[in-house]
Amino acid sequence: MTHPLIRTASGIALLGAAPMAAWAHVGEHADGHAHAHAHGLVDAFAQAFIHPFTGADHLAAMFAVGVWSALTVRPAWRAPAAFVVLLMLGALAGFAGLHVPAVEPMIAASVLVLGLLVAVQKRMPWGVAAVVAGVFAFFHGAAHGAELASDSVIASLAALAGMALGSALLHVSGMGVGHLLSQKHYRWIAKLGGAATALLGLGMLARLA
């Protein structure tokens, strides 16, 4: 029974991406400047919404934050909230064209560290957890922002909103899985998943070396 429940919880965010991808193409052939402008905003929002789901690095890190928080951080929502806030700040830096050094190594390191935190499951104060999550989030946001930057301020804001929503759904799905695995008999599954995530991060760092 455990495995279907885990698959269901972890699939919530992925299922949410599908309607947005379709919505981005509604009315694609209609005429008129106003419609084209509206479509551009919807497209920017939808692309940013699904962006965190399209890379193993972003998906693994954000999902791991949710699992880790549910298992070890109280209140569980504060570290994910800090992640989303700092993600937005990093994205704004990317939108502005600011050079943020070591983005790729820090993203790889985030996957490694967050995976280890899930595997170890050591409790820590929520303030420390928020700082850890927030530091890594800034670099994820900078990478997203650089990839999704737009010439239009309104389109950039739409992208920012989409990114925040997509990231939050990943956190929520991770928290759902973490809650399921918080029972004593199932914690080994979280440890195994955390170790696998850490190995992914280690492999990413090795490729960058």
Image (spheres, helix red, strand yellow):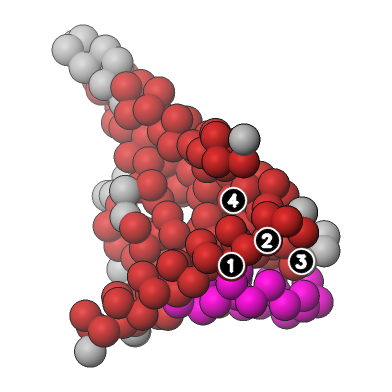
Drawn side of residue 38 relative to residue 124, left or right:
left
- Answer few, some or many: residues within 10 Å of disc 1's Cα (few below 14, many 20 plus, some between 14 and 19): some
The vertical placement of 142 against 12, above or below, is below
**In front of the other: label 3 or label 1?**
1
Mark 4 secondary-structure assignment: helix
Q: Is residue 112 magenta?
A: yes
Q: Position of residue 177 (x, y in %)?
A: 62, 48
Q: Position of residue 58 (x, y in %)?
A: 40, 59
Q: Position of residue 10 (x, y in %)?
A: 52, 42
Between discs 3 and 4, the one toward the N terminus: 3
Drawn side of residue 71 relative to residue 28, left or right:
right
Magenta region, residue range: 110-134
Drawn side of residue 113 relative to residue 42, left or right:
right
Between marks 3 and 4, how big is the CA–CA gap?
13 Å
Between marks 3 and 2, how big is the CA–CA gap?
15 Å
Residue toward you, 174 or 165: 174
Q: Residue at x 36, y 70 (%)?
A: 200
- Answer few, some or many: residues within 10 Å of disc 3's Cα (few below 14, many 20 plus, some between 14 and 19): many
Quadrant occupied by the N terminus: top right
Mark 2 secondary-structure assignment: helix
Q: Answer whether labels 2 and 1 touch (C-beta < 8 Å).
A: yes
Kindly identify the amino acid type of the residue bearing the numbered disc 3.
Val
**In front of the other: label 3 or label 2?**
2
Q: Is residue 78 magenta?
A: no
Drawn side of residue 186 relative to residue 45, left or right:
right
Tell me the tag on residue 187.
2
Q: Main secondary structure of the magenta part?
A: helix
Q: How many marks?
A: 4
Between discs 2 and 4, the one toward the N terminus: 4
Kindly identify the amino acid type of the residue bearing the numbered disc 1.
Lys
Q: Answer whether labels 2 and 4 touch (C-beta < 8 Å).
A: no
Q: Which residue is mark 4?
A: 174
